[in-house]
Amino acid sequence: MSLTHRICQLMSRASSYLVNPSSKIQVRSISTHQPLRHQHSKISDTFRLTMSRLASPAMILTSAVPMSKNSSTTTATNPEIDPKQDLHGMTLSSVCSLSVYPTPYLEFNLHLPSYTSKALHENQYLAVHLMPPTHHSAKICRVFAKGVKLNKRGTKWTSQLDTHSKQEQVNDDDDGEIFHEMTTPFTDLVENQDYTFVKRTEDNVAIPVLNHAESVFICKTIHNFSIDDHEIWVVQVIDIMTDSKLNKSGGILYFNRGFHKIGETLSED
């Protein structure tokens, strides 16, 4: 059975939940600006704390914009558009390889609501960055992780709380996830210094690519489906850009609310 056939089967099963209210998993259409309110449960709390024990690869996703909104042409054709507000991306801890042959695919999930999700639906192209384990990369990963974090009850994370609520908020933050809601990270970056554009003129889109990445996967969206307040995406890798001056590093790991690098090799004797 082909990979595409298996993915279609999975999406078909997910779609069946929409018409079967007795299903354990409810798949919903989620507004970009209306987050779901989370139900407090013991198993969810235990799961969240257990997952926080696990290190995950931190990779940066940037989504394409229509060519006319690329900052190199904006002044001439769209002076009313602020290009940095149209550029979106986020730091992900869920990227993994789905397939190598016959077609390379990556998969990842997005927490909703998300400007990045909206951009992927509209423009279909993206770049996924493997960053070298440096202080600069950690800083950039944090820039792409900024946003208005939602706690597990669906309300905004804030410092104006009593002692009990602050402790609950600390627990919410210690969940192993880098990022939780919407962000516009490019407002903190400088074109050419921090990023450039890869243009796909045949598709009339431009993809922002970070300058200091070890490798960059240029991708096209293939499938996506929603489960509760997350989207699962499958994207096809159509090109790979690698900095030949950088050695294989293992990338950046996210653990215990911080960024880390690969340590020593463990003996198997």
Image (cartoon, rainbow, N blue to C red):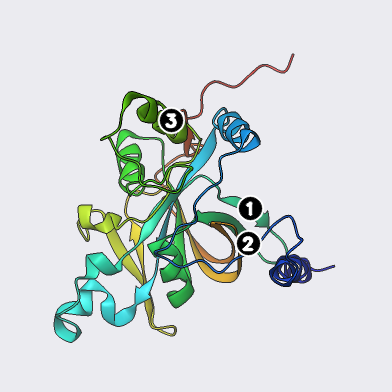
Residue under the image location 78 percent in, 69 percent down: 9
Residue 34: % across, % down: 43, 62
Q: Is residue 29 left or right of residue 211?
A: right
Q: Residue at x 51, y 66 (%)?
A: 30
Q: Which residue is mark 1?
A: 97
Picture quadrant where residue 69 is located: bottom left
Percent across and percent down for residue 239 are 51, 65
Q: Nearer the viewer, residue 190 or 168?
A: 168
Q: Sort mark 1 into few (<14), some (14-19) or many (20+) by Cα contacts within 10 Å.
A: few
Name the amino acid, label 1.
Answer: Ser
Q: Where does the image place residue 109, in percent across and percent down from the top left?
A: 55, 55
Closer mark to the observer between disc 3 and disc 1: 3
- Res 33 seen here: yes
Indicate which disc, 3 or 1, sits on the residue closer to the N terminus.
Answer: 1
Determine which residue is flagged by label 3.
Answer: 168
Q: Earlier in the sequence, mark 2 or mark 3?
A: 2
Say which label, 1 or 2, has the lower sequence index. 1
Q: Nearer the viewer, mark 2 or mark 3?
A: 3
Q: Which residue is mark 2?
A: 105
Measure how far apart labels 2 and 3 are at the Cα level. 38 Å
The quarter of the image holding the C terminus is: top right
Could you tell me how far apart the alpha carbons at marks 3 and 1 are, in whole angstroms?
34 Å
Of the residues shown, which amino acid type is indicated by label 2? Answer: Tyr
